[in-house]
């Protein structure tokens, strides 16, 4: 079992940058597919980015070219670098771990709030 704790959220102006971190404990993230999700008020949770065991990545069309997911297995941490943020990126961002891949996630963090002002 792995525990996930997100950090790095906050208030940022449109066009600015933010880096989210997801620190894992309990087990090495090297065994897991990792993903970032977000949920805005009144909206369903959506996938933002994911990274495979060997580093292959997926980014949603809405963030492609602006956000980058990465992993540092030695630090047991996953990152989401957010550049050129927009007000519509405002949401609670969650980190998740999957032991099987295929979009099914077993473990979730508590989330970190990102607010983008216009």
Image: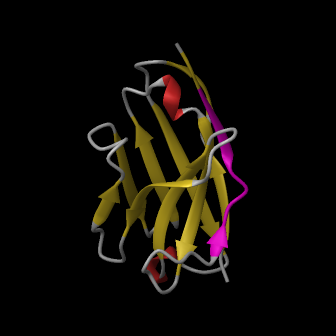
Which quarter shows the N terminus?
bottom right
Name the residue at 37% across, 41% down.
62
- Give the total number of marks visible in the rendering: 0
**Residue 99 shown in magenta:** no
Q: Is residue 75 visible?
A: no
Q: Of 29 and 94, which appears nearest the observer?
A: 94
| Prevailing SS of the magenta stretch | strand
Q: Looking at the image, which residue sits at the far top?
A: 118
Residue 116: percent from the left, percent from the top?
56, 23
Q: Is residue 95 visible?
A: yes
> Is 81 placed above or below 102 here?
above
Segment tinted magenta in the rendering: 107-115
Residue 64: percent from the left, percent from the top?
30, 44
Q: Quadrant of residue 101?
A: bottom left
> Is 82 placed above or below 54 here?
above
Q: On the rendered structure, is 69 left or right of 36?
A: left
Name the residue at 32% across, 47% down.
61
Q: Looking at the image, which residue sits at the far right?
A: 110
> Is 44 placed above or below 92 here?
below
Name the residue at 51% across, 75% down.
29
Name the residue at 48% across, 59% down.
78
Residue 73: percent from the left, percent from the top?
44, 70
Q: Of 53 and 76, which appears nearest the observer?
A: 53
Q: On the rendered structure, is 115 left or right of 20?
A: right
The colour scheme is secondary structure
Residue 76: percent from the left, percent from the top?
52, 67
> Is 58 placed above or below 7 here?
below
Q: Looking at the image, which residue sits at the far bottom?
A: 100
Q: Of 5 and 102, which appears nearest the observer?
A: 102
**Residue 112 shown in magenta:** yes
């Amino acid at each position: 079992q792995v525990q996930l704790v997100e950090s790095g959220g906050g208030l940022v102006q449109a066009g600015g940058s933010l880096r989210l971190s997801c620190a894992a404990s309990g087990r090495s993230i090297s065994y897991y597919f990792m993903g970032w999700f977000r949920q805005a008020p009144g909206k369903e949770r959506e996938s933002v980015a994911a990274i495979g065991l060997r580093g292959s990545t997926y980014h949603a069309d809405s963030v492609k070219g602006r956000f980058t997911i990465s992993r540092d297995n030695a630090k047991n941490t996953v990152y989401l670098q957010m550049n050129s943020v927009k007000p519509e990126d405002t949401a609670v961002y969650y980190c998740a771990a999957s032991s099987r891949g295929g979009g099914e996630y077993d473990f979730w963090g508590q989330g970190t709030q990102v607010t983008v002002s216009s």
